[in-house]
Image (cartoon, grey):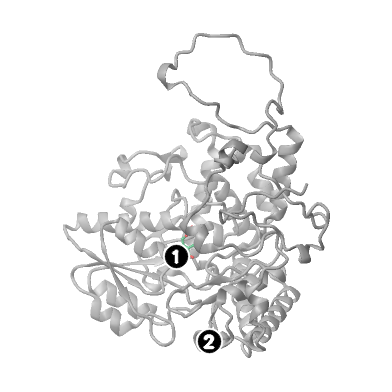
Amino acid sequence: MSDWSQAVSAGKPAKPDSAAAGATITGNRGLRIEELLLFEQDRPGRTAVDLPEPPKVQSRLGTLARKQPVGLPGLAEPQVVRHFTRLSQKNYGIDVGTYPLGSCTMKHNPRLGERVARFAGFADIHPLQPQSTVPGAIELMDTLAHWIKTLTGMPAVALSPAAGAHGELCGMMCIRAALMARGEIRTRVLVPESAHGTNPATAAACGYAVDPIPANAEGRVDLAALKAKLGPDVAALMLTNPNTCGLFETEIREIADAVHAAGAYFYCDGANFNAIMGRVRPADLGIDVMHLNLHKTFSTPHGGGGPGSGPVVMVAGLAPYAPVPWVVRGADGLRLVEHSEGPAAESLGRLKQNHGQMGMFVRSLVYMMSHGADGLRQAAEDAVLNANYILAGVKGELTPAFPGTCMHEVLFDDHFLAGTGVTTLDFAKAMIDEGFHPMTMYFPLVVHGALLMEPTETESKEGLDLFISVIKGLARRAKSGDAEYFHAAPRLAPRRRLDETLAARKPVLRWQPPPTDRQAAE
Ligand SMILES: Cc1ncc(COP(=O)(O)O)c(C=O)c1O
């Protein structure tokens, strides 16, 4: 097979470097097989199934009838199976190796959770089944809520939000509802400059003006600047703790007091709770409402855009507005309140169809119960220890963005690359050749050329030592003046570096049939 698939960057096909490939006849490298697009494998008439011709019926589609064939490729079943299996083998995932993406918490997904989530009693139930037929599932939701409330110290939790960003929306809508109930119109939300982009986006989506708070020289919220911005028109502060610089906000109690004194609410982005679970209860820090990312903290898999889960814990004053469904305990045991009525009369209603991500609830609860309270605390401590091990290991070669130790993730700026001609992006591409998924780059924006690394508790000492030796080795190579090496990276990946600007400006999102000979001649 020496025919190449269409390049993502449009225009020229992206061929692997023939020198690096060892110039094989096929272009394949060992078991790494070059893959044609399914459309390019099309043989009209070939099919994976052989069904009898359906009886002729009078079409009722009228003008809606398709004018052209749908254009699906003709393929045999083994072709399809091989194609997707090979593509899956080109994927990098937490089951393949270290995945140090900062702010993402790519931790191991324990197989116990996967196994339990597949139990028929969880996997084969339907959200529209009568509640009386699924008491176990409702009890699981209640038990998960109990663990979340105990870990955070909060009295209420909304389980249905489908991701961290969705949890933020839920929390800010509860704040808005509470302010409306107080008869107050507040228009501004304060958001630190280092915040994840979802924070200002959520505030804006809820109709608030976003007012940024600068960071101080230690990478934390500038308390004086925050106080100066507080006023009667501030609805809330949205603060991440530990923050996106991987640092604990040491003045968080003072921050909470100042926010409350101004009559505003304190929203905490709890996406980084994995660094403090079992050590700190957010309720004790003065937080009013906070989301958790079950897919980060409690080990459920990150899906490509879902299914995630972002439960939201909240203080009693916000709880009446929480979205349904609610699990409540009545005389007959547990039941779900599914509509904004009775005890949930003031609820926002539904933020999501059905009850939330059941499979994620199961996996998270398995993670919690199998670790136990002490195990969860240790997981948080190990995550912080691992990040600090990297910090200590590479400190001499890389430039930490802020002084002191870090929490679960460690942030470097690109000063160590100054004058080398190598950028953070080049550095990341060279990591791919070493078999590592790159760290998060250029985020948070408050740090120049940021490199944000988060090993999580998953990585062993040996794994971290190898990672550190690679990072240090690459840093030395960059400083030695070998910029060319970095500019050409990755050399060994299935595809070389894409023209990212062209790919962004002129994305090829749809395969087009190649021009016929006649069209080409015209
Ligand atoms: C600090 C922070 N806030 C919010 C989010 C958004 O979470 P999600 O991707 O589940 O919407 C993330 C995601 O990684 C995050 O790191």
Q: Earlier in the sequence, mark 2 or mark 1?
A: 1
**Which residue is rendered at x = 72% and y = 63% of the image?**
17
**Which residue is rendered at x = 35% and y = 51% of the image?**
322
> Which image quarter: residue 488?
bottom right
Residue 69: where, in percent of width, then height? Answer: 55, 26
Task: Give the vertical position of 233 relative to 475 (above or below).
Answer: above
**Which residue is rendered at x = 71% and y = 28% of the image?**
46
Q: Residues within 10 Å of mark 2 (few under 14, many from 20)?
A: some
Check disc 1 and report the residue beneath it.
Answer: 153
- Circle 1 sits in a helix, a strand or a loop, which is it? loop
> Are discs 2 and 1 less than 8 Å apart at CB?
no
Q: Is residue 84 left or right of residue 245?
A: right
Residue 240: where, in percent of width, then height? Answer: 42, 70
* Of 47 and 99, the residue lying toward us: 47
Quarter of the picture holding the C terminus: top right
Check disc 2 and report the residue beneath it.
Answer: 415
Task: Give the vertical position of 113 relative to 68 (above or below).
Answer: below
